[in-house]
Amino acid sequence: MGWSFEFRKSRAYRYLYLVQKGRTPKGPRNVRQIYIGNANRLFEKLTHPPRHLRSFPFGKSAALLHAARRTGLWDALLRHLPGPSSRSAWLLLVQILARVERPVSREGMARWFPESSLPLLAPWTEAPSGRVLRAALRDLYGTDLETPTGPILTRARVRAIQEDVFRTLRAQGLEPHLLLFDGTNEFVHHRAGRWTKKGKSKARRYDKNLIGLGLVTMGSIPVLSEVFPGNRNDMETFPEVFEALLTRLERLEVASEKLLLVVDRGVNSVDNFDDILGAMHVVASLKRNEFRELFEVPLDEFRTVGHDTEGRPVLGYSSRKEAFEREWRVLVTYRRAEAVHGAAQWEKAKAKVLPKVALWRKGRPNTKQKVAMTKLVDLIPREYRGIFDYGVEELFVRDAKGREVRRYLPRCTVSLEAETALRASFGKAAIITDLSTTDLSDEELLNSSVARVEIEEEFKWLKDRLVISIKPVWVWNDAAIPGHVFLCVMGLMLLRYLQWEVRDLELSVKALTERLGKIRVAVVSRGGEPGEGGRPAWILEEMGMEEAQLASRFKLLDEMEAGMAP
């Protein structure tokens, strides 16, 4: 349907909106609206076109301030940070906003502040220095207390802040039923400390120290997080994170026995499943080698159990199996698109490995067995090392002086039996749960597993320089490093909340931030005269229909009027 004008009355004033109607299950309804203003404001716009003096990026900052109020983050920062002033809370919020804008250091944030719209949104503030921003960051974990082994840090403040946000989101109807857990690590430019350790880097930066992050999301909104040393894997860190999660759920008065926790296969162990099933239900993924016979079930025994996010059918095969000292209900799923992708990746790996090894065999043999083996292992992708039959052959050759010496050549072929099993598994995944089909249907089980992809999306955005990136981490204090990670998680929480508020528009996080980035505010004068009150006025610049829609939905004009209370 087309657009039309509509007047609305509030406190004896009439305001004009541009609205678009659409058909809904409840009949014709307004599906979009853009606020224009009252008659005087419209007359002023039409008769006195503004003259721009300067413009600022506005959409991201104003929308995030809107989300900080709506999620309770702003009130939580005020409530739990040390000291009676709102200054620390504002300085932390500035860092979240700056990090969403672009991944800059605290010195870069200090330079960004005067060029942003924040002096207009909060005219009572002064431009902070990098030193002041770092000091505020340390307030999240620091205590100003030390022992002979180092400073005493506390997680109490960040946990209290997140729990307050959790309560606010529940009050808005985001009730937790499905919790998603996963872990990751990120490299930092920092000496080894309490959090930063050498370990297996998921970014393959083995030269750097790592910091670990465990994340629990409510739907797609990250609500609870834990920072831990980066040299520990998911299986080691999960008990600690899960124990903290249960304690926090108890404080939040959430009945954990009604929850369903979805975890990645890196968590799988007898002890971890004992901990989970003692408190709540679980959905987990299996590795290919854990139930190999199920991955070899022919496709004609599968049936359609649901659809993926793009509406393509997903096939499933149900069974029951024993693993981790208990019996599980198992659903093996098959996605054709993933099968095609898996086959292509395998052929690509073979085309890389086999010719390279053949070339090495024609060249000069290695003088050391370890060197030859290391080169071969590094060449073969980790996920295919059980499919290739590889090793090092010892041979004797004569050197330039005619002496017989040992030399070593790599060898590599494909195990036909292993390749057959691999091809049978392409596109398949095994999901286990303790719930029966009466409590959780196959389709619901599939959907809960698909939902786990959302937490992987969270980590992707936390590593995306175009949305909100944890890296680079240019802070050095033991309290500032986890504080930096916490602020990045809270920034992503605000973006996900904004995405939830306009969920009917079906925007990705990246699309949302790109559209908000196009909304700018301009300082203007009208007809050569200053704005009201003898000062220049500021207005939203002209924008596209999609940007105007977001400005209306997030009430960005209200942010222009309200600002942040000191």
Image (cartoon, rainbow, N blue to C red):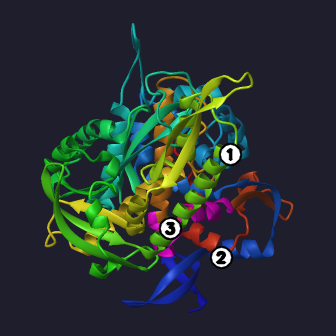
Number of the front mark, 2 or 3: 3
Residue 511 sits inside the magenta stretch: yes
How many marks the image carries: the answer is 3
Can you say which quadrant of the picture contains the N terminus? bottom right
The span from disc 3 to disc 1 (Cα, nearest Å) is 29 Å
Residue range corresponding to the magenta coloring: 500-519
The span from disc 2 to disc 1 (Cα, nearest Å) is 64 Å
Q: Secondary structure at mark 2?
A: helix
Q: What's under tag 3, amino acid-wise?
A: Ala
Q: Secondary structure at mark 1?
A: helix
**222 and 444: which is toward the camera:** 444
* Residue that label 3 marks: 343
Residue 105 sits inside the magenta stretch: no
Residue 548 appears in the rendering = yes
Residue 246 location (% of width, % of height):
22, 43
Callout 3 environment at 10 Å: few (<14), some (14 to 19), or many (20+)? Answer: some
**193 and 426: which is toward the camera:** 426
Q: Secondary structure at mark 3?
A: helix
**Up-down relation of residue 462 to residue 544 (above or below):** above
Residue 545 got which mark?
2
Residue 45 location (% of width, % of height):
74, 72
* Residue that label 1 marks: 362
The span from disc 2 to disc 3 (Cα, nearest Å) is 43 Å
Residue 434 location (% of width, % of height):
16, 59
- Dots 2, 3 in contact, CB < 8 A: no
Q: What's under tag 2, amino acid-wise?
A: Met
Number of the front mark, 2 or 1: 1
Q: Residue at x 70, y 26 (%)?
A: 399
